[in-house]
Image (tube, rainbow, N blue to C red):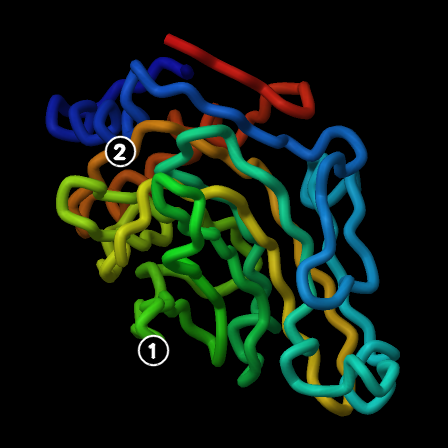
Amino acid sequence: MNKITISGLMGTLLLIATSAVPANATTVTQTFDAPPSGWTVDRYAPAGFTSPVLFDGDNRLQETISSADGGNNRPSIYSSSFYNTQGMAHTNLAGTIYESIQLYVSTAMLSDPNRVAGFWGVGTDASNVIQSYPIVELAGGTFRGWDSAGSWVSMGLPSGLTGNQWVTLAMGLDTANNLIDYTVEGQLFTTVSAYGTTHFDSTILQMYNTQDGIDRTVYWDNLTNSDVSPTPLPAALPLFASGLGAMGLLGWRRKRKNAAAIATA
C-alpha cells in the first residue's frame, strides 16, 4: 500500500476499512481475466455474458440484454414476464456465508426507472434445501434488498454516488441470529431474516428485460465468496474512508491476475 501521511484518526479509519474480511477466512475471487467457466443459465440467457472485456482500464465481465429477447419477441413458452429476468448462475465456494461483487454504476443506470441489475444469492440450509434468495438490486435509481418473505426493502444510495463509479455490493450471513446483512460500499444498509439459511450455495448475476425489449450493458468485477462473514462497518466510516481512495486505497481495486484467486490463512 502507498505510504500515507495522515492524522492518527485517519490512519485508524484506513486500517479498519481495508481489514473488513477476517484473516482466517478462505476466499475465492473471480477476477474475470479469463472466459467465464462453470456458469449456467438462470431463467433465460442474457444476450451476452463475456470476459475478459477491457473496460475502465481493466478486464471485466460484460453482461448484456437485447431488445430481441423482450417478452413479445421470445418464443411463446418464454413470453411471460418471469423470463424478463435474464442471468447466469455459478456455484459458490463450499460453506460460503459472505459474498461480494463490484458493479459499474453509470449515470444512465441511476436515471433508469426500471430494474437494471441484481446480485443474487441462493440461500440453502444444512440439507441443501433452498430457504432464501438474498438479492441486492439497482432499480428505479436506488438500491434495494429482497426479504424472502416476499417484499423489497429500500436501501437508498451511498453518499456521493452520482454515476460512472464502481460500487461494491455484498451480502453476509449471520447464522447465530438467522439474519442476512445487505451492504453497498461497506455500509450496513438493511438486514432481513435468513429463514434458516446456513450458507449461500450459488450466485446469480441478473439483468432485467421488458415485454417490448431493451438493449443494455452492465459491467461486473471481482466476485468474491468467503466462508467467514465480516462485521459490517459503521455507516459513516466507509463514506469517509472512500474519500481516501486516491491516497491509499488504490490497492483495493488492483486485481490479482488469475481467474480464481484462492487465499487461505
Residue closest to the far front: 127
Residue, x 31% and y 72% (percent of image)?
149
Determine the residue positioned at 69% across, 85% down.
210
> Judging from the image, what secondary structure is the residue with disc 1 in?
strand
Residue 223 appears in the picture as rendered? yes
Q: Are marks 2 and 1 in contact (CB under 8 Å)?
A: no
Q: Quadrant of the N terminus?
A: top left
Residue found at x 35% / y 45%: 125
Instruction: List x then y, in percent, for residue 97.
Output: 35, 37
Side (left or right) of 156 relative to 219: left
* Residue in front for this viewpoint, 198 or 192: 198
Q: On the rendered structure, is 9 left or right of 29?
A: left
| Residue 103 screen position, x and y as percent | 55, 52
* Above-or-below relation of 243 to 182: above
Circle 2 — which element?
Answer: loop
Q: Is residue 72 left or right of residue 167?
A: right
* Label 2 environment density (alpha carbons within 10 Å; few <14, some 14–19, many ≥20): some
The quarter of the image holding the C terminus is top left
Crowding around mark 1 (Cα neighbors within 10 Å: few <14, some 14 to 19, many 20+) is: few
> Considering only vertical position in the picture, is 227 above or below 163?
above
- Earlier residue among tags 2 and 1: 1
Please state which amino acid type lies under the numbered disc 1.
Ser
**Which one is in front in this view, the residue at disc 2 or the one at disc 1?**
1
Q: Is residue 180 above or below residue 17?
A: below
Residue behind mark 1: 151
Tell me the distance, in whole angstroms, between the alpha carbons under discs 2 and 1.
Answer: 25 Å
Horizontal arrangement in the rendering, residue 174 relative to residue 118 (left or right): left
Question: Residue 80 at x, y = what percent?
Answer: 70, 87
Q: Is residue 221 above or below residue 123?
A: above
Q: Which residue is mark 2?
A: 230
